[in-house]
Amino acid sequence: MLDVVTVLTYNVVINFALMIVATIAWARNPRQKEIIFWALAAWSMVIGTICSSLTEHLPYNILGYVGGVVYVARTGLIRLGFKEFYGQPYRLWQAFNISFVVCMLMVLAELLEDPGPVRISLIYLGSAFNLALGTRDLWRGNPGERLPSGRFAAIVYVAYALSSLLIAPLPILYPIEFIGRTPVSEWLTYTSMLLLVFNLLAFLMAMVLKLERGGEIQRRLAERDSLTGLTNRRMFLQQAARLSEGQGTAIAVLDLDHFKRINDTYGHKGGDDALVQFAERVLRLLPADAVFGRLGGEEFGICLPNQDRASAWSTINAIRLAVASEDIRSGDHRFRMTVSCGLVLTQMPQRSLDAWMAEADVGLYAAKDQGRNRVVLHEPGASHADGSATHLETLVLSDWDGITRLSA
């Protein structure tokens, strides 16, 4: 059977290994504050465990205070690490407020005839409270980010907190006995092993979340446009290809008019601001099932599933009107821009997305030829040269603009 000293020795060795790993991670990523907090938590665990292992050489009361407060502060540091990781607001003192309260209560416990069991119980209670707060922070996460292991990490921390809470009454119900300065307790042996396992899981989940975050960043870099946050060309074509297999899917290609002039007049920052604000305005007007991506430069693509001819054109033209009617803000500059759009409605499932994109491009070229700032719905099979496809949309556009002016 394992004795308490042996278990504490295992704790020191294992936590020392964790401390080395966390410290190396800290040294390699000195600007990532969450790793700093987790490394400090590993150091605290080692210091607290060493204090608990030196009862034969130093006064137990001193070690009890130091080790206990440091042990509770460790869970507070882990909590702040998760707050930093998820971008949640915090103050540095939040890592130590629970340990400070525990310290004050330990001092008050000296008024009791036998304060030892109460002091030990307070350490477990303080750790449980910190872990519960950390679980809440984990569960909240970052609203704009979903890491698959986040919920599982919260479950691990719930179990860790509950274990500490359930252990808290044991020092009072079954006081630890001492042979000389060596603690002897069967429950302390097993619970120390249990908490060691949870401590390992806690640090393991922190590392898993870091790896998932790194993988998510790489995935976003591969799928998203870095400036606008929209899907990039490759991902747009991949998603749109699935939707275009059925009838009733609209494909639109949009091009910002005279974009080079914006860059020349307001600089590249002005151009970047125009692209970002254009993307934001379009996203506000698109249905939830739409796919919207940046195809390159000032050209964008939209895929609208489950659309008929009128609803698709109405949605894209509403985007055109919104873009033309709102100022672009870039520093002290205010300016407006317009967008030309080519639109096509899929009618033959056997055709590829590339063919439909080519049809939409025909509509875009027609919109440019007719003076820009308009939507042209191109009918597949119609000859662009005879103007049959574009003439109808020009008439509809005129009617739409008239209605808009009358309703303004």
Image (tube, grey):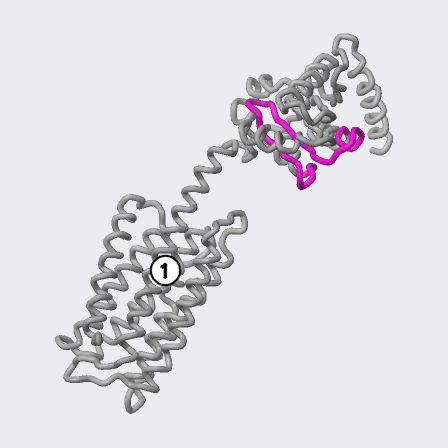
In depth, the one of 63 and 261 nearer the eye is 63
| Camera sees residue 89 | yes
Task: Determine whether, in the image, residue 93 is placed left or right of residue 148.
Answer: left
**Is residue 261 positioned above or below 283 on the image?**
above
Q: Which residue is mark 1?
A: 202
Within the image, what quadrant is residue 363 found in? top right
Kind of residue at disc 1 = Ala
Within the image, what quadrant is residue 384 found in? top right
In depth, the one of 166 and 43 nearer the eye is 166
Q: Position of residue 395 (x, y in %)?
A: 84, 19
**Residue 308 inside the magenta-drawn segment:** yes
Residue range highlighted in magenta: 284-313
Q: Residue at x 34, y 57 (%)?
A: 203
Neighbor class of circle 1 (other Cα within 10 Å; few <14, some 14-19, many 20+) is: some
Q: Residue furthest left?
A: 57
Tell me the SS state at disc 1: helix
Q: Residue furthest front?
A: 350
Task: Determine whether, in the image, residue 40 is placed left or right of residue 166.
Answer: left
Q: Residue furthest top?
A: 385
In depth, the one of 22 and 349 nearer the eye is 349
